[in-house]
Amino acid sequence: MARSGTAGPDDSRIRVMRVIARMNVGGPALQVSTLMRGLDDELFDHRLYAGFVGPDEADYVEQRAPDVQVCRVPTLGRAVRPTDDLRALAALTAAMRRFRPHIVHTHTAKAGTLGRLAAVLARVPARVHTYHGHLLHGYFSPAKTRLVVRAERRLAAVTDRLVAVGCTVRDDLLAAGIGHPGQYAVVPPGTTAAVPAPRAEARRSLGLPEDGPVVAYVGRLTGVKRPDRFLSVAREVRRAVPGARFLVCGGGDLHGELETAADLSESLHLLGWRADVETVYAAADLVLLTSDNEGMPVSLIEAGLAGLPAVATNVGSVSEVVRDGHTGLLAPPDAAELTRHAVRLLRDDRLRLLMGQQARTWTAQRFGAERLVQDTHDLYASIAVARGWWPTPLTKGANR
């Protein structure tokens, strides 16, 4: 864990204040945890500020990162409540005035708004924001989406660097007039594969038969993720491949829709949030993603590291994780085509295993934790040198 003590007058480290709305299980929390663990504490003095997770969410810190220290801001959660938001803004502004960060780095939409406004009020020299996805499609009505775009444009104007998790995410934001090309850096997520249990052991622990095809879904169960589409695919796959079973690892406000799918009661296994997600991947034959909108799903990266091919909707930067026809199969947001792809892989053991092997190689090369940490180090170093906080040689300081 990096040191987080107040910097003294002779401390040459760059002080970074990282702000995220909440550390719920998902890609942003994994990425933030990786950075908090990985950035060199001889060069960076950084602190993490976050609210609390919602009642239908699991806390990533509790489940998978108890070593990561979090400064809690109780009113910073996901929900938009004007009074609480003003309190969170005041709390963040006060924390910045105490800590005096060189850089405020915000993650997720609400924290990006409040954190950057607080950084302006506290006169923080440099502001960075990461788009782990965007809210341009699948979340709001057209009128509300236009308001979101206007707000993001104004926030981009007071931000030094904008980070996108994928090229498609960046291009979508630029097309909406949010920021300019020179502000953006593309920094894909990075993680390390946990050591899984053997397949037979993983299946026994989840109450599955040792034989038979298994399809996994890992993620939130909420509108934009389209659990209704997942159920449609599961029903059709079950008809085409008798004996197929479906693992759902996650939770959310639409969890009830899956609980009431009586026709799938024997084949649908609702696992809730689990700390040992590697057990789910070890038990599965492929992973399914049915979303209308995504940034760059960490669940697909984790699945690839576990040697699983993916069947996924071709939205956001999914195609930058899943190489269509090579590490998995992509489709438009259409249940029938997703079903065809899933059935094809479940019926063709040779193709499925080949794609899984290729997925492991590809994701290990592209999405390692060390690469994420080094990319972020280089981003901060470029700001530090431009501002005169660091001498030029430290831009190349290999901190691994």
Image (cartoon, rainbow, N blue to C red):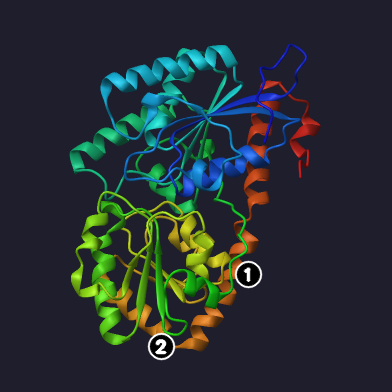
Q: Please say whether residue 279 is visible from this viewpoint.
A: yes
Q: Earlier in the sequence, mark 2 or mark 1?
A: 2
- The quadrant of the picture occupied by the N terminus is top right
Q: Relative to the observer, which residue lies in front, 33 or 138?
A: 33
Q: Mark 1 and mark 2 in contact (Cβ < 8 Å)?
A: no
Q: Which residue is at 38% across, 36% downward?
A: 109
Horizontal and vertical percent position of residue 145: 25, 40
Q: Is residue 189 left or right of residue 144?
A: right
Q: Relative to the observer, which residue lies in front, 63 or 215?
A: 63
Q: Quadrant of residue 233?
A: bottom left
Q: Is residue 246 left or right of residue 161?
A: left
Q: Which residue is at 39% across, 48% downward?
A: 172
Q: Is residue 151 left or right of residue 157?
A: left
Amino acid type at image mark 1: Thr
Mark 1 lies on a secondary structure that is helix
The number of numbered discs placed on residues in the rendered structure image is 2
Q: Which residue is at 73% across, 30% downward?
A: 43
Horizontal and vertical percent position of residue 337: 30, 75
Residue 361: image tag: 1
Amino acid type at image mark 2: Arg
Horizontal and vertical percent position of residue 47: 59, 27
**Real-space CA distance between mark 2 and mark 1, rounded to the nearest whole angstrom:** 23 Å
- The residue labelled by disc 2 is 347
Vertical position of residue 176 compared to residue 345: above or below: above
Is the residue marked by circle 1 packed among few (<14), some (14-19), or many (20+) residues within 10 Å? some
Vertical position of residue 376 compared to residue 106: above or below: below
Horizontal and vertical percent position of residue 60: 48, 44
